[in-house]
Image (cartoon, rainbow, N blue to C red):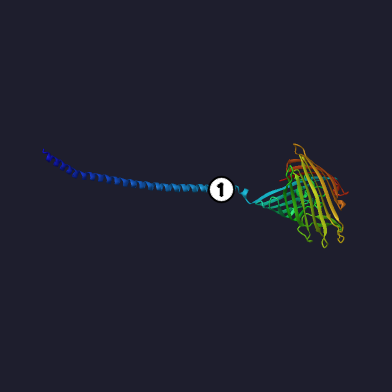
């Protein structure tokens, strides 16, 4: 073949091939792109559906988690409520406490006079609010010789606990003068079945007052081996009343059991200061002053003073006390003479080692302007301590008083006392 014809023929064929083949390739590429696009769109739809499903599941999970948390919180609230109800008695602002003591006794007087002589019950009530306000009260129920039951209010005060060192109380309180009447007279505290001579009702020691009292305790800055402390009681009260004898010409006694009347507008001012230089020793001093008057008469001076002490060494317990009351004379009175009452006692108690037995001895002396009530006494006792607050006491008193008076009779005592 002529080369000159071949070359143009080949060129023409190439041109035709390009013309015919190019659209075919473009068409195939276009078809592949459309299919890919459709596939992508399908995948995107599937992805959107998956996202929607996941979002729904996530929301449901969140709702379930929130429900679980709410249920947990509800259970926790129930637990706290139950715990609070169980602990309410521990945290409640008002608290009530019952204490007190009881005693039964047997007495044999000389000459023969055997009898079960004592049945007494003294409940003590305490009501407090937030350790700030305290109401305390003691009742005394006792069977009299005729079988009647006597009810008396021993004391009732409302106390304001200002701080650790100051308490203010108002009402009827046991006399803060001396130590026996305020702290030692309860049957389960007193180591003998009877009070010392002169420390009973209407004798040398005042019993109770109605008024206002400030009391507390403070540390004493002293360079000693042991810390030292002081306690104090300061009070103002209605003045006691004067009791005349049957003839009406002498003052027989000072009634100091606490009265709510004060017709002569005379008040009694006094107090007690106690010092504890070491924990085992206390020394106290008491004093009071006021004016007293019989009805339609002028005032006369009335004074009380005394001191007391208490020392403990191992199993030995020693204490003593002195008290004196004095009513001045008044020449214009129907009972013009001065009257005095004084009493003191010394007591020692020794507890046997490793036993529940305790020996007690006490000497007491009571002097008065009226000889028929005076008494000198020795008392010996043996106690068996069932518990520290429950005991049986055996005691014998050797009494020396006015002849043919009960104060001259020796006495045997058996007493069972329990404090709670």
Where residue 274 sits in the image (x, y, percent)? Answer: 76, 48
Residue that appears at 34% across and 47% down: 44
Q: Which residue lies furthest to the top in this view?
A: 354
Quarter assignment of residue 414: top right
Provide residue 235's location: percent of width, then percent of height: 75, 55
Q: Relative to 41, is 153 on the left or the right?
A: right
Determine the residue located farthest toward the left in the rendered image: 2
Q: Is residue 336 above or below residue 25?
A: below
Give the percent coordinates (x, y) of residue 168.
71, 54
Q: In this view, does 342 lie to the left or right of 232?
A: right
The quadrant the N terminus occupies is: top left
Q: Which residue is drawn at 37% across and 46% down?
A: 50
Crowd tier of the residue under label 1, counting other residues whose Cα lies within 10 Å: few below 14, some 14–19, many 20 or above: few
At 52% from the left and 47% from the top, the residue drawn is: 75
Looking at the picture, tell me which residue is in the foreground, 190 or 283: 283
Residue that lies at the very extreme toward the right in this rendered image: 403
| Residue found farthest to the front | 4
- Is residue 99 something one can see in this rendering? yes
Count of marks placed on residues: 1
Toward the viewer: 68 or 193?
68
Q: Circle 1 sits in a helix, a strand or a loop, which is it?
A: helix
Residue 317 figure quarter: top right
Front residue of 388/52: it is 52
Q: Is residue 106 above or below residue 331?
A: above
- Where residue 349 appears, as percent x and y from the top left, is 79, 41
Instruction: From the image, tell me which residue sits under label 1.
Output: 80
For residue 148, say whether it is visible.
no
């Amino acid at each position: 073949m002529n080369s000159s014809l071949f070359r143009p023929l080949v060129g023409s064929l190439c041109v035709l091939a390009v013309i015919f083949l190019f659209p075919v390739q473009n068409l195939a590429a276009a078809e592949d792109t459309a299919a890919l696009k459709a596939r992508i769109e399908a995948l995107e739809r599937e992805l959107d559906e998956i996202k929607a499903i996941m979002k729904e599941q996530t929301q449901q999970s969140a709702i379930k988690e929130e429900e679980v948390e709410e249920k947990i919180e509800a259970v926790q609230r129930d637990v706290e409520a139950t715990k609070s109800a169980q602990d309410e008695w521990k945290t409640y602002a008002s608290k009530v406490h019952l204490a007190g003591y009881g005693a039964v006794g047997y007495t044999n007087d000389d000459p023969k006079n055997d009898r079960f002589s004592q049945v007494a019950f003294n409940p003590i009530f305490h009501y407090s609010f937030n350790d700030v306000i305290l109401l305390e009260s003691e009742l005394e129920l006792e069977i009299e010789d005729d079988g009647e039951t006597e009810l008396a209010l021993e004391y009732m005060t409302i106390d304001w606990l200002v701080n650790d060192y100051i308490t203010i109380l108002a009402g009827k309180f046991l006399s803060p003068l001396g130590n026996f009447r305020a702290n030692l007279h309860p049957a389960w505290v007193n180591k003998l079945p009877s009070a010392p001579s002169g420390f009973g009702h209407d004798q040398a020691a005042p019993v109770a007052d109605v008024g206002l009292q400030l009391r507390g305790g403070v540390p004493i800055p002293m360079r000693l081996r042991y810390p030292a402390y002081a306690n104090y009681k300061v009070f103002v009260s209605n003045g006691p009343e004067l009791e005349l004898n049957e003839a009406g010409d002498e003052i027989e006694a000072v009634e100091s059991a606490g009265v709510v009347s004060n017709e002569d507008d005379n008040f009694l001012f006094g107090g007690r200061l106690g010092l504890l230089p070491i924990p085992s020793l206390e020394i106290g001093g008491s004093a009071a002053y006021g004016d007293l008057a019989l009805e339609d008469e002028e005032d006369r001076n009335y004074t009380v003073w005394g001191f007391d002490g208490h020392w403990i060494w191992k199993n030995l317990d020693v204490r003593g006390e002195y008290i004196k009351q004095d009513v001045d004379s008044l020449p214009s009175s129907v009972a013009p003479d001065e009257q005095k009452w004084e009493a003191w006692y010394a007591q020692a108690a020794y507890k046997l080692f490793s036993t529940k037995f305790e020996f007690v001895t006490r000497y007491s002396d009571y002097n008065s302007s009226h000889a028929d009530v005076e008494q000198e006494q020795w008392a010996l006792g043996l106690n068996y301590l069932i518990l520290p607050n429950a005991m049986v006491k055996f005691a014998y008193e050797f009494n020396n008083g006015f002849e043919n008076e009960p104060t001259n009779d020796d006495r045997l005592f058996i007493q069972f006392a329990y404090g709670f």
